[in-house]
Image (spheres, rainbow, N blue to C red):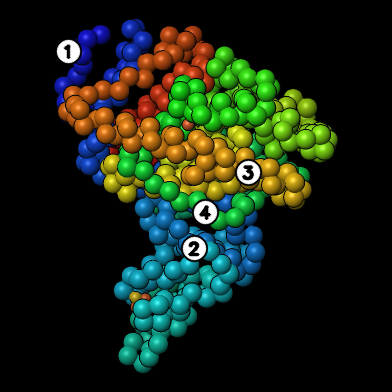
Amino acid sequence: MNVADLPPQGSAPILEDKTRGVFRVRRSVFTDPAVLERERRVLFAHCWLYAAHESELAAPASFVARNVGGRPLLLNRDRQGHLNAFFNSCRHRGALVCREDRGRARNFTCPYHGWVYGDDGRLLHQPIDTSYTDACKSDPALGLKRVARVETSSGFIFVCFDAAAMALDDYLAGAAEYLKLISSQGPDGMEIVGGTQKYCAHANWKLLQENSVDGYHAESTHATYLGYIRNREGTVLNNYGQAFGQVRNLGNGHAVSESVNATPWGRPCARWMPSWGEDVKAELDRNFAEIASRIGEEQATFLCRGDRNMLIFPNLIVNDVSGLTIRVVYPVRHDYFEVNAWALAAKGESARIRDLRLKNYVEFLGPGGLATPDDQEMLELCQRGYAADPEEGWNDLSRGMADEQQGRANKVDEFQLRVFWRRWAELMQREPELAR
Ligand code: FES
Ligand code: FE
C-alpha cells in the first residue's frame, strides 16, 4: 500500500486492510483537540472507569477523594458499611467539599459556607438556616450527588457516569477473570500499599495505553534496565527477546499480554531471583505451595511464574510483573496526560517479601525508576514527532497482522494495540449516548 492510497484527512482514523496485513492509525487522533473533546463525551462519560481499591475503604468512615475521568469524586465507606461514590462538589455553590486525598470522616463540611453532609451524602446542616424555606431545607436534591453507577470486581471499584451502562461484569468481559487471578496472590486478599504515585507527560494519553501492553519496545527502550538485571542476576531467565508469550483479546477493547518464566526479573508473588538469597527462596516456595492449595498447581504456576500486562478499556492498566501496579491515565489536554498509580500487594505477606516487592516496584514501575522514565521519554518523542506531518501522518501498527488471522498473537506483536484501537474507533463513531 502506498501513502497515496490512504484515505484523505477527515475520514476514518483507522485504516485496516486484512488482505495486505496493514493496520494504521492516523496521527491526528493524538494531536487534534477535537478528538479529545469527543473522547470525553463518548468514552469517559459512558465507559466504566477504575476509581479505587476496596482495601482503601476497608475501615468504617474511610474515604478517598480523587479525579476519575476528569471529575472530582469522593468515595467512602459509611457507618452502615455501604460503599458510596459522590461527586466532590457542594450542592450550594459548587466548592470541593473534601480537600484531603484520603482519611476517615463521619461528616464532610464544605469549607466555603459550612454546609455539612453526612457520610451517606445527606445534607445535615446549613449555617444560619433561618433564611431558607422549609421546602428548601428538606430538599433531598441538596445532598451530595451520587455517581450514577458504582460496582466492584475482585476488590477493584469502578464507577460509570452513565446510568444505562451495561453491568460491570459484562463490561469487563474476560478481564474480570484476570482481576480475580491477580487478586489470588495472598490468602487474605490484596491491599494498596502506601499512597498514590502521581506523574505526568507531555503526550497523548492513548500513547501510554499502547506502551503499557507493548512488548516490542522493551529491548530497545529498556536496555539499561534489562542490562542491569541481567548483570545482577547472571543468566537466569535471560531469554526475554526470544520469549514471545501470548496475547489474548479479552473483549470490549481489553487485552492482556502474558508469558511464563520469560522475563529476567523476580516476582515477589513467588518467582525467586538469586540476589534475593536462599532464605527468601524457602519463603517463596511456601508462598507458592499456599497459592497452589487454593487455586491449583497449574493456575499457581501461571500466576506466580508468569508476568502479565493488562489493558482495561479505556484508561486502566494492571501490570503484574516485577511489581504489581494499578495505573490510570487521564488526558488533561490532547498533548498532556496525568497518571495516578498504586502498588497492590498481598495482605499479610512478610516484611522481607513486602520490602522486596516495593523495591522491585520502584525499580521498574515507579515514576523515578529505571523503566518508567524511559517510557515517558519515548511517548514525548512520539508526540513531538507528530508535528512533522500533523495532517497526513499515520502510525503503523501492522506487526503480527498475518499471525492474527491465523489465530496467533505474541507479546512483541501489536495485536493487543489493535484490540484497543478497534474498540476506540467503534465507540468514537457512535453517537455519545450509544457508546456503551
Ligand atoms: Fe459549599 Fe457554599 S459552596 S457551602
Ligand atoms: Fe516500557
Whole-number angstrom distance, CA of label 3 to CA of label 4: 16 Å
Mark closest to the chain's N terminus, 2 or 4: 2
The picture places residue 193, in percent across and down from the top left corner, at: 62, 52
Element under disc 2: loop
The numbered mark at residue 359 is: 3
Q: Which label is found at residue 101?
A: 2
SS class, disc 3: helix
The residue identified by callout 4 is 196
Secondary structure beneath disc 4? strand
Task: Tell me the amino acid under the disc marked 2.
Answer: Asp
Dot in front, 3 or 4? 3
Identify the residue at horizontal 32%, vertical 32% (top origin). 381
Inter-mark Cα distance, 2 to 3: 24 Å
Q: Are marks 2 and 4 in contact (CB under 8 Å)?
A: yes
> Spatial distance from mark 4 to mark 1, Cα to Cα?
47 Å
Quadrant of the image containing the N terminus: top left
Quarter for ligand 1? bottom left
- Tag of residue 4: 1
Q: Is residue 270 above or below residue 416?
A: below
Earlier residue among tags 2 and 3: 2
x 50%, y 35%: residue: 371
Amino acid type assigned to the residue bearing label 3 in the image: Lys
Q: Nearer the viewer, mark 4 or mark 1?
A: 4
Q: Are discs 2 and 3 less than 8 Å apart at CB?
A: no
Quote the CA–CA distance across marks 1 and 3: 50 Å
Q: CA distance from mark 1 to mark 2?
A: 52 Å
Residue 369 point in image, percent of width and height: 52, 41
**Which residue is pictured at 64% across the width and 37% down the height?**
182
Q: Residues within 10 Å of mark 4 (few under 14, many from 20)?
A: some
Q: Residue furthest front?
A: 231
In the rendered view, would you say 23 is above or below 421? above
